[in-house]
Image (cartoon, grey):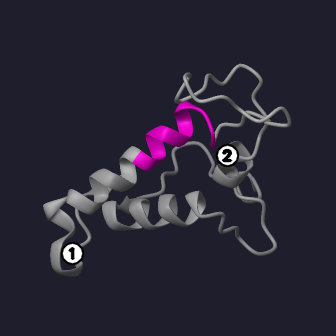
Amino acid sequence: QNDTGDQLGDGQYVGYSRRQICFITAKALLGADTEGYKNGLTRILNTTVGHCGSPIPSVPRPSDYQPSALTGEFGISLWNLVSACAADPSLKDGQHGPLVL
């Protein structure tokens, strides 16, 4: 296969346990980054997206507000994922839950 740098080649997959996905999501929401590497999730979350709707339309935004994937519906879906992780019985007692490809 061709060298694709830090990207997977055709037919290659990465597997994560549910616990790993929950951990990565929580860290990203709290602003953690990967030292020396601009990971895709952090890049997406910090991208200004002018068309992101307000998660709470009745709450006024500051005049200098820059909508991003983190502050829009995508960010809300990540918080919902973390909530689901907290309630997931397959993660009880340090278990890793199902494998996600």
Residue 24 in sight: yes
Residue drawn at the location 27% of the way across and 62% of the way down: 86
Residue 101 in sight: no
Q: Is residue 40 magenta?
A: no
Q: Secondary structure at mark 2?
A: helix
Q: Please rate how many residues cluster around mark 1, counting C-alpha atoms within 10 Å: few if below 14, some from 14 to 19, many from 20.
A: few
Residue drawn at the location 60% of the way across and 26% of the way down: 54
From mark 2 to mark 1, how far is it between C-alphas? 28 Å
Q: Main secondary structure of the magenta part?
A: helix
Q: Which residues are magenta?
A: 70-79
Q: Is residue 78 left or right of residue 31?
A: left
Q: Height in image: 68 above or below 29?
A: above
Q: Quadrant of residue 16?
A: bottom left
Residue drawn at the location 49% of the way across and 58% of the way down: 25
First in sequence: mark 2 vs mark 1 = 2
Question: Residue under circle 2?
Answer: 45
> Mark 1: which amino acid?
Gln
Q: Height in image: 15 above or below 32?
A: above
Q: Name the residue nearer the viewer: 39 or 7.
A: 39
Question: Residue under circle 1?
Answer: 95
Q: Position of residue 28 (x, y in %)?
A: 59, 60
Q: Position of residue 1 (x, y in %)?
A: 66, 52
Q: Is residue 74 magenta?
A: yes
Q: Residue furthest right?
A: 64
Q: Please rate how many residues cluster around mark 2, counting C-alpha atoms within 10 Å: few if below 14, some from 14 to 19, many from 20.
A: some
| Total marks in image | 2
Q: Is residue 80 left or right of residue 50?
A: left
Q: Quadrant of residue 3?
A: bottom right
Q: Is residue 83 left or right of residue 92?
A: right
> Mark 2: which amino acid?
Leu
Mark 2 and mark 1 residues within 8 Å of each other at the beta carbon: no
